[in-house]
Image (cartoon, rainbow, N blue to C red):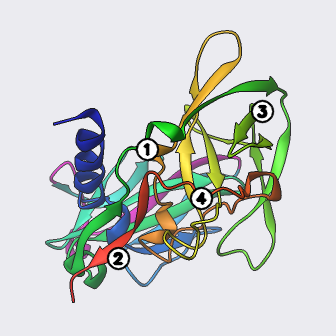
């Protein structure tokens, strides 16, 4: 198995995991003490200025952490504590820029997961392993998001990446996501051969502010798998005129 085949296999397994993108059935913004439809309990932020949620439930609600039923109040560490309920559902506290207190709910028996077959991909193409130069700055950049009705959210960025693709020069703007810098981009395949909103590629930092973009590892954004995700959309600087015929293309569902 090649490195690319192993990467695609891992992507497939991650998508189908208990908290895989395709199983997301709800995402709630917990702004105060409240109940929600998809999961029992009463939910509230731990603090106003940091991620994390608190849930209050009884044993009859059927919520558990590490196999232990909740009977009282439990604090969820964002992106770490997993709540289980029923035979197929889980939930976690999470966050994104300007939304610190999100509650994500997954169900591995949902219709989208049941009909998922695979992710269609291009064959690896060395032409689309591209190096560029990082022009560092500490800018906070406004990205529009898929579920914000044209509004934007501020994302941290490491700078711009000067690259030449298909004979044209670009200053691509990545956004920071945890430990990774990610370029969200559209290209000439978007909406025709690949997912319409665009795709993402992780920036690999080399020595002396050189970086590598391996578009063979370009991947579909989470919102391609579930409408409950709110994904950053490609800014104008990241709209590439060349057809990037590499990486993931679209989701294939069973008929």
Indicate the position of residue 128 as horizontal and vertical percent values.
53, 41
The magenta stretch is: 49-67
Question: Do labels 4 and 1 touch, CB within 8 Å?
Answer: no
Question: Do labels 4 and 2 touch, CB within 8 Å?
Answer: no
Up-down: is 123 above or below 85?
above
Dot 1 falls on a residue whose secondary structure is: helix
Indicate the position of residue 36 as horizontal and vertical percent values.
47, 80
Is tag 4's residue or tag 1's residue first in the polypeptide sequence? 1
Residue designated by label 4: 243
Crowding around mark 4 (Cα neighbors within 10 Å: few <14, some 14 to 19, many 20+) is some
Distance, label 3 to label 1, CA atoms, is 19 Å
Residue drawn at x 25%, y 56% as measured from the top left: 12
Q: Which mark is residue 46?
A: none
Q: Quadrant of residue 168?
A: top right
Image quadrant holding the N terminus, namely top left
Q: Quadrant of residue 211?
A: top right
Distance, label 2 to label 1, CA atoms, is 38 Å
Is tag 2's residue or tag 1's residue first in the polypeptide sequence? 2
Q: Is residue 186 left or right of residue 84?
A: right
Q: Which mark is residue 162?
A: 3
Q: Residue furthest bottom?
A: 255
Crowding around mark 3 (Cα neighbors within 10 Å: few <14, some 14 to 19, many 20+) is some
Foreground: disc 4 or disc 1: 4
Residue drawn at x 24%, y 43% as measured from the top left: 5
Residue designated by label 2: 40
Q: Is residue 182 left or right of residue 222?
A: right
Crowding around mark 1 (Cα neighbors within 10 Å: few <14, some 14 to 19, many 20+) is many
Up-down: is 44 above or below 254?
above
């Amino acid at each position: 198995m090649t490195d690319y085949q192993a990467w695609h296999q891992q992507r497939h397994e991650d998508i189908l995991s208990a908290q895989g993108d395709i199983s997301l059935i709800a995402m709630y913004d917990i702004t105060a003490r409240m109940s929600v439809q998809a999961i029992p309990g009463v939910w509230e932020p731990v603090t106003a200025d940091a991620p994390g949620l608190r849930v209050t439930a009884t044993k009859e609600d059927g919520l558990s952490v590490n196999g232990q039923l909740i009977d009282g109040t439990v604090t969820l560490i964002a992106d770490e504590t997993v709540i289980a309920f029923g035979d197929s559902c889980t939930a976690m506290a999470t966050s994104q820029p300007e939304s610190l207190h999100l509650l994500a709910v997954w169900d591995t028996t949902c219709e989208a997961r049941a009909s998922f077959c695979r992710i269609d991909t291009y064959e690896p193409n060395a032409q689309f392993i591209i190096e560029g130069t990082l022009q560092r700055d500490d800018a906070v950049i406004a990205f529009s998001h898929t579920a914000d009705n044209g509004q934007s959210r501020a994302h941290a960025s490491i700078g711009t990446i000067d690259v030449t693709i298909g004979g044209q020069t670009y200053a691509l703007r990545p956004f920071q996501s945890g430990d990774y810098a990610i370029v969200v981009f559209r290209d000439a395949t978007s909406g025709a051969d690949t997912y319409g909103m665009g795709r993402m590629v992780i920036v690999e930092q080399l020595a002396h502010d050189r970086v590598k973009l391996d578009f063979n590892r370009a991947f579909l954004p989470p919102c391609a798998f579930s409408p409950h995700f709110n994904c950053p959309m490609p800014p104008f600087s990241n709209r590439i005129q060349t057809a990037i015929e590499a990486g993931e293309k679209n989701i294939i569902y069973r008929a």
